[in-house]
């Protein structure tokens, strides 16, 4: 848990060498409610920091998950295409959304404690 | 408390849920019979011929009528109780307008009849066009768009055509505030524009400094509703329109909130170039499932030739249909929703100039009265005097008691009221948006406030299970997840229905 960092836009990322794994926080999935559909990016797509990468559709709303830093997609969690509820059940584990190669390192995310304070 | 707007006395509120028609089905029962075959039978041999019988529910005519009548009795409606749905202007629809619209001389008129036989109908369009232009401060109107969102698209297509004709194709950006109705950015995208969002300031109004930063040579226009969705009058509207006009853009007025200002101020005087009105809101024609709606678009004279036709005009004491030269094309078959337009004209004539002059003020008075009562129960989102609607937020109750706007809306149903709009505008957390309209009495507003206090107290009690609300309705909280994931719209999808059950 301790290596996971959070953004103000409620994504989490885990950086290992030059690769990040990204998902949305437990707080975010709770706010969205039951997630019914997820539109994932394609492997190889490039995103700038702050660009919308994943579209998350819940019963009453649609939200975007943004790129935490400039990156190129290396893998997506295709389980979410058939079982989007995985995000509700395990947002920071099996509910990860994509992995990406970091193009410009920006490790400015909040720690878990900082994020907890931010959302409360 | 006793009030005219409380529907808790409805005899069919409570009791068991109505069975589905599939559950009422029994093999062999029929509600209708085909006449005897009196022509030679022909065998059809075609690949698309179905091999199996359609799996339709089989019920007797009486069971069928009882089923739908019971469902109809359980429908909440403006005619049954108070419907404080913010941004929707759910006002009373006068019966007199209905009786005029059912007159066979209007109701049986065919839209293809030649002009010389439909002079009365043309006069209806001509007169209401003039009234609407007078009320909104515009010059010409088209009654083609059948609804508000269609009116928005019409307006945006007019901007697009205007830019094309004037060789201003580089102007591709439409500015929309973050508090706007969701239809605004959607209409702009549908018309082929890029949407640029402008932030709202801490008072709940368009942030002028941010607007100045965003506006550039590519700005095609701005879409705004005034009062905005926070129920606040955009005080800087003249500055806003100057900023947009200086950049060569046009101003579009989303008429969803027109009810607040009728008789007091006019979009045309604020600098707007295009206005849509929702006759099914501001001008008291049926709204929602009882529609259809009507979203006429009015413009300043320099945009007249882009309007969708036909438009009724009067020449040499004779009415005729006019087709604008550079028209964006039709938005509807024939002449728009005529009988709806007629109802709106009757409403305007019933109120007269004197009544219309007071319309907005009374709507605002009712909203301010209710907001002062609600603010003592749930804090308001903005510390500004409201117009025709106001926004409250239960974000504090969510922190302290996990009570969401959704829970308050659901619990209010038990008390005989429709829920206010929830989770809108999007920029207010846990928003509840109330719009009483001028057609509710003081007693009804008092009753709603009292009921709201009771349920907010109830929901905070230690042994409360939020999911139990509403407690007195035949259906509690429907599962919203499964229908969203497995949408079932066909009679044949019974297997799918079973999964969802």
Image (cartoon, coloured by chain):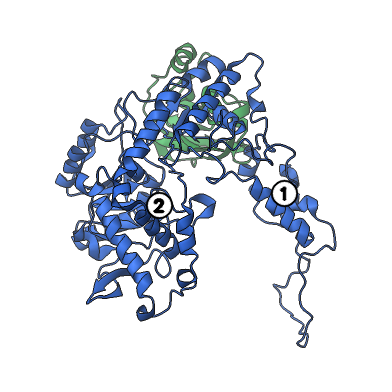
Chain colours: A green, B blue
- Position of B136 compared to B257: left or right? left
Q: Foreground residue, B106 or B57?
A: B106
Q: Is residue B291 above or below residue B309?
A: above
Q: Earlier in the sequence, mark 1 or mark 2?
A: 2
Disc number lying in front (1 or 2):
2
Q: Is residue A23 visible?
A: no
Assign the C terminus of chain B to one quadrant of the image.
top right
Image quadrant containing the N terminus of chain B: top right
Residue B119 visible, this angle: yes
Please tell me whether mark 2 sits on a helix, a strand or a loop: helix
The tally of labels here is 2
Q: Residues within 10 Å of mark 1 (few under 14, many from 20)?
A: few
Nearest to the observer: residue B111 or residue B477: B111
Q: Position of residue B388 (x, y in %)?
A: 37, 37
Q: Disc 2 sits on a residue from what chain?
A: B
Q: Is residue B133 left or right of residue B82?
A: left
Which label belongs to residue B148? Answer: 2
Q: Residue at x 35, y 44 (%)?
A: B259
Q: Residue at image x 41%, y 34%?
A: B425
Give the labeled residue for mark 1: B496
Residue A29 position within the rendered picture, expressed as x and y whole percent measured from the top left? 55, 28
Q: Residue furthest right?
A: B27
Which chain is disc 1 placed on?
B
The residue at 41%/43% (across/down) is: B182
Tags 1 and 2 on a common chain: yes
Disc 1, disc 2: CB below 8 Å? Answer: no
Q: CA distance from mark 1 to mark 2?
A: 35 Å
Q: Which quarter of the figure has residue B490?
A: bottom right
Q: Position of residue B459 (x, y in %)?
A: 59, 20
Residue B92 vertical position relative to residue B323 in the rendered view, above or below: above
Secondary structure of the residue carrying tag 1 is helix
């Amino acid at each position: 848990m301790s290596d996971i960092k959070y953004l103000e836009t409620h994504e989490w990322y885990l950086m290992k060498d030059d690769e990040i794994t990204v998902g949305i926080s437990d707080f975010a999935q709770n706010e969205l409610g039951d997630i019914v559909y997820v539109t994932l990016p394609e492997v190889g797509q490039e995103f700038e920091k702050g660009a919308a990468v994943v579209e998350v559709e819940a019963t009453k709303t649609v939200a975007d998950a943004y790129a935490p830093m400039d990156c190129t997609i290396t893998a997506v969690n295709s389980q979410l295409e058939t079982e989007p509820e995985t995000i509700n059940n395990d947002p920071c584990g099996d509910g990860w959304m994509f992995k990406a190669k970091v193009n410009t390192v920006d490790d400015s995310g909040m720690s878990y404690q900082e994020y907890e304070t931010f959302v409360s | 408390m006793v009030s005219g707007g409380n529907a808790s006395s409805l005899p069919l509120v409570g009791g068991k849920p109505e069975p589905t028609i599939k559950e009422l089905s029994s093999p062999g029962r029929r509600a209708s019979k085909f006449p005897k075959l009196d022509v030679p039978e022909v065998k059809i041999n075609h690949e698309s011929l179905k091999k199996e019988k359609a799996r339709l529910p089989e019920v007797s005519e009486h069971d069928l009528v009882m089923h739908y009548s019971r469902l109809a009795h359980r429908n909440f409606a403006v005619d049954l109780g108070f419907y404080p749905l913010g941004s929707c202007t759910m006002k009373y629809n006068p019966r007199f307008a209905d009786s005029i619209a059912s007159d066979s001389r209007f109701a049986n008129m065919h839209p293809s009849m030649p002009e010389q036989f439909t002079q009365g109908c043309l006069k209806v369009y001509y007169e209401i066009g003039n009234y609407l232009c007078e009320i909104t401060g515009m010059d010409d109107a088209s009654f083609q768009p059948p609804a508000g969102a269609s009116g928005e698209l019409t307006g945006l297509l007019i901007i697009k055509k205007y830019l094309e004709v004037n060789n201003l194709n580089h102007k591709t950006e439409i500015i929309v505030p973050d508090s706007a109705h969701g239809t605004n950015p959607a209409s702009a995208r549908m018309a082929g524009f890029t949407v640029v969002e402008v932030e709202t300031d801490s008072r709940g109004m368009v942030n002028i400094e941010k607007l100045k930063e965003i506006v550039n040579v590519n700005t095609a226009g701005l879409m705004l509703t005034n009062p905005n969705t926070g129920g606040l009058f955009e005080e800087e509207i003249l500055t806003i329109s100057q900023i947009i006009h200086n950049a060569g853009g046009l101003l579009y007025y989303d008429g969803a909130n027109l009810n607040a200002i009728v008789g007091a101020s006019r979009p045309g005087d604020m600098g707007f170039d295009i206005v849509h009105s929702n006759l099914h809101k501001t001008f008291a024609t049926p709204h929602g499932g009882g529609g259809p709606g009507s979203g006429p678009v009015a413009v300043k004279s320099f945009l007249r030739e882009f309007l969708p036709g036909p438009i009724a005009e009067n020449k040499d004491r004779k009415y005729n249909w006019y087709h604008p030269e550079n028209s964006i094309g039709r938005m509807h078959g024939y002449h728009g929703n005529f009988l709806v337009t007629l109802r709106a004209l009757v409403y305007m004539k019933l109120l007269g100039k004197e009544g219309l002059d007071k319309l907005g003020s009374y709507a605002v008075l009712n909203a301010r009265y209710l907001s002062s009562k609600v603010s003592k129960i749930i804090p308001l989102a903005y510390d500004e005097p409201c117009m025709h609607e106001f926004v409250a937020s239960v974000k504090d109750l969510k922190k302290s008691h996990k009570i969401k706007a959704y829970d308050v809306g659901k619990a209010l149903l038990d008390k005989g009221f429709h829920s206010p709009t929830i989770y809108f505008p999007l920029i207010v957390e846990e928003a509840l948006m109330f719009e009483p309209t001028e057609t509710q009495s003081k007693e009804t507003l008092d009753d709603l406030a009292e009921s709201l206090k009771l349920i907010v107290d109830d929901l905070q009690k230690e042994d409360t299970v939020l999911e139990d609300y509403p407690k007195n309705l035949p259906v509690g909280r429907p599962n919203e997840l499964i229908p969203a994931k497995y949408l079932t719209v066909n009679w044949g999808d019974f297997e799918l229905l079973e999964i969802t059950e």
